[in-house]
Image (spheres, grey):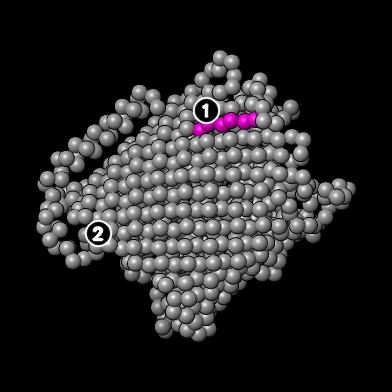
């Protein structure tokens, strides 16, 4: 970490310590303690956001815990969200919000930004659903403070109840799926300790159309995939305490997983390729609740994340390539809160350091950094965010507004590790983001208007490449987007039948899209190639028709257009997203113990590449490229006292379609889950 960053982190720490030292003696801690000695203190996990609207949603644990197999299953049911994955448990999963790329989405777990600085990605399903307390979804804004993203925010808050509880669940399913979850929480007077562990495994041997079968390369054969198994162990600890005006929360998460990498081209039994990962994440959050006039609180946070990924590329017995990727991340921040009359002011400052190191071998010998093959590198990214959030709440009207501004200072560098006299490449930049929102609403009608200017800075890989077949481009401009969004939400009850209707319309202009370009010799680099315009409309309606019957309808349309100096990419639709989506869900409570839910999704107008060479239409569907899809899922839930059984069937009618990775999707999948709570 360079001197400038060290000095700024030191300054933040000193200011924090001085503030705490000066303010704590002024508090009324003793009176606070005397008034609450008989009560158990509860620490709220989910922040209270005054901009809650159709653009911002919170999913509570009870909304998904008994019916969803993974986080991607949960998020895939949200209007405006699309999941991109290669079928099968443990394969890469990414997310698109309102047409964004996954790199444009910020992903948080307990306030920790998980996005990888080297590649910009994250593993959407790295946290089991049993370990989730709530999910916050912002479709085009930051959550609380920080930089404004282009593609919204997903924030996961882990299991941390305020009461004593415990739970055991076992699940079995298709293709060798098995899962075991253990959860326990112990609540003390001013203290709560939660512990959980998960074991998950799957053979992933679903049927797949292999283009050139290993046994008969001249034919395409549908057969079970080989070397596609997945195994994962996860452990987490949440420790929360509140004494007088002091809140302290500690998070510790460990994940270990191993995933075989199938050869989709010929399904060779000799293929031994796999990727294994060990990760350890630690977070500490301290919050001082003030009784001093105008000062609400002072929040301090620190987290550390370490990840080791070992990739083995061994398609046959004669060659073995390994790549060991090690990533570390450290973060420290401070966020005080001040309130004067109807105004709230939240300045913030944080510093983050990311270090990525790779070590590669070919048949157990280190690769030479010769300008042709990929080089091992050490890449570093140092970021400082300085900004503030201003909020206003009318005292006489249901009217509120907010303004968020952030300045990002970024220092990126990369150096080859196995090169004679390597040169260090470096890039220093600073970026501004801002957003503004107005909200008006009563018990029946809520309206929200938002404007934002977001940014997605180039990743280290995009800037510096690997010194081999993929060259970096340190002249890359950041992706920038200006977004306008209007949402309306209406709730009413007619003849004892309640219903909710909501809609959102948004317009987004994206500049300097970063994509990979390859020359005739196969050497690639990233460059800014195009701009894009998106206009979208979301409609949804939910109704509790009777005490037992409820229905939900959703629709999402996107109209996109790209502008590029490359003729092949000009005036085209954005690839990798469905431009039309429709869904309907029906839930019925048959009796006191048994409920049934059916959900159908219709997705249309998908383009697989930037030139729109493969567009979806009825004629293509007849010729064997059915990118349009209709998928129906069914679930049955039975509960008696502390016992519950959930039976779910994904892709009930076994519809054949191409997933967003342009590969045949996994067919019908059945899972049976049995749970016991508060034994």
Q: In which quarter of the image is the N terminus?
A: top left
Q: Which residue is drawn at 28% across and 47% down?
A: 286
Residue 344 percent coordinates (x, y): 24, 49
Instruction: Tell me where the magenta segment starts and ends, as one range.
Output: 356-361
Whether the magenta-drawn stretch holds residue 498 is answered as no
- List the residue tagged with mark 2: 190
The quadrant in which residue 393 appears is bottom left
1 or 2: tag closer to the N-terminus:
2
Q: Which of marks 1 and 2 is in front?
A: 2
What crowding class fits label 2: few (fewer than 14 Cα within 10 Å), some (14-19), or many (20 or more)?
some
Q: Under tag 1, what secondary structure?
A: strand
**Picture layout, residue 332 above or below residue 465:** below
Q: Which residue is drawn at 74% across and 34% down?
A: 319
Residue 627 percent coordinates (x, y): 70, 56
Q: Which mark is residue 378?
A: 1
Q: Under tag 2, what secondary structure?
A: loop
Q: Is 65 left, or right, of 518 in this rendering?
A: left
């Amino acid at each position: 970490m360079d001197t400038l960053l060290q000095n700024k982190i030191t300054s933040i720490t000193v200011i924090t310590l001085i503030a705490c030292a000066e303010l704590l003696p002024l508090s009324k801690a003793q009176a606070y303690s005397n008034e609450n000695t008989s009560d158990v203190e509860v620490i709220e996990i989910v922040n209270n956001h005054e901009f809650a609207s159709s653009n911002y949603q919170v999913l509570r644990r009870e909304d998904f815990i008994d019916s969803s197999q993974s986080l991607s299953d949960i998020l895939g049911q949200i209007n405006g969200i699309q999941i991109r994955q290669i079928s099968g448990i443990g394969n890469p999963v990414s997310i698109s919000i309102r047409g964004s790329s996954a790199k444009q989405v910020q992903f948080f777990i307990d306030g920790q930004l998980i996005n990888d600085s080297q590649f910009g990605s994250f593993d959407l399903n790295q946290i089991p659903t049993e370990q989730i307390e709530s999910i916050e979804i912002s479709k085009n804004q930051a959550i609380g403070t920080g930089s404004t993203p282009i593609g919204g925010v997903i924030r996961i808050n882990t299991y941390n109840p305020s009461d004593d509880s415990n739970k055991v669940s076992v699940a079995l399913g298709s293709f060798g799926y098995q899962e075991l979850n253990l959860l326990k929480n112990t609540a003390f007077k001013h203290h709560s300790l939660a512990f959980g562990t998960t074991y998950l495994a799957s053979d992933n041997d679903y049927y797949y159309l292999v283009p050139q079968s290993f046994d008969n390369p001249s034919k395409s054969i549908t057969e079970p995939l080989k070397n596609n198994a997945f195994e994962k162990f996860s452990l987490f600890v949440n420790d929360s305490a509140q004494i007088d005006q002091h809140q302290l929360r500690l998070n510790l998460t460990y994940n270990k997983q191993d995933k075989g990498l199938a050869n989709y081209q010929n399904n060779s039994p000799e293929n031994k390729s796999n990727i294994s990962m060990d990760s350890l994440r630690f977070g500490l959050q301290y919050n001082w609740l003030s009784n001093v006039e105008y000062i609400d609180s002072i929040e301090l946070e620190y987290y550390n994340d370490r990840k080791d990924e070992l990739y083995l590329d061994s398609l046959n017995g004669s060659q073995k390539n390994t790549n060991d990727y090690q990533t570390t991340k450290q973060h420290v921040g401070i966020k005080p809160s001040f309130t004067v009359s109807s105004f709230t002011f939240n300045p913030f400052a944080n510093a983050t350091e990311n270090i990525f190191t790779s070590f590669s071998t070919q048949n157990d010998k280190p690769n030479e950094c010769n300008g042709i093959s990929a080089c091992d590198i050490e890449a570093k990214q140092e970021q400082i965010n300085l900004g503030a959030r201003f909020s206003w709440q009318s005292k006489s009207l249901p009217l509120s507004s907010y303004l968020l501004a952030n300045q990002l200072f970024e220092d990126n560098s990369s150096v080859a590790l196995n090169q004679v006299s390597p040169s260090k490449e470096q890039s220093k930049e600073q970026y501004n983001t801002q957003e503004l929102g107005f909200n008006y609403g009563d018990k029946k009608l809520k309206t929200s208007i938002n404007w934002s200017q977001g940014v997605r800075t180039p990743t280290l890989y995009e800037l510096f490449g690997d010194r081999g077949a993929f060259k970096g481009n340190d002249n890359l401009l950041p992706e920038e987007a200006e977004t306008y969004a209007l949402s309306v939400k209406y709730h009413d009850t007619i003849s004892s039948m309640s219903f909710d209707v909501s809609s959102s319309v948004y317009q987004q202009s994206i500049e300097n899209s970063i994509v990979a370009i390859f020359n005739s010799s196969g050497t690639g680099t990233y460059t800014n190639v195009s701009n894009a315009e998106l206009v979208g409309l979301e409609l949804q309606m939910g109704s509790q028709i009777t005490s037992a019957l409820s229905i939900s309808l959703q629709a999402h349309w996107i109209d996109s257009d790209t502008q590029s100096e490359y003729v092949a990419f000009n005036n085209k639709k954005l690839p990798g997203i469905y431009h039309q989506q429709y869904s309907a869900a029906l839930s019925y409570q048959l009796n006191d113990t048994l409920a049934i839910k059916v959900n159908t999704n219709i997705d249309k107008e998908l383009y697989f590449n930037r030139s729109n060479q493969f567009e979806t239409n009825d004629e293509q569907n007849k010729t064997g490229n059915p990118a349009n899809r209709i998928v129906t899922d069914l679930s049955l839930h039975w509960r008696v006292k502390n016992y519950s059984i959930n039976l779910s069937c994904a892709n009930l009618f076994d519809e054949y379609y191409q997933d967003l990775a342009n590969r045949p999707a996994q067919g019908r999948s059945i899972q049976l889950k049995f749970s016991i709570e508060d034994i």
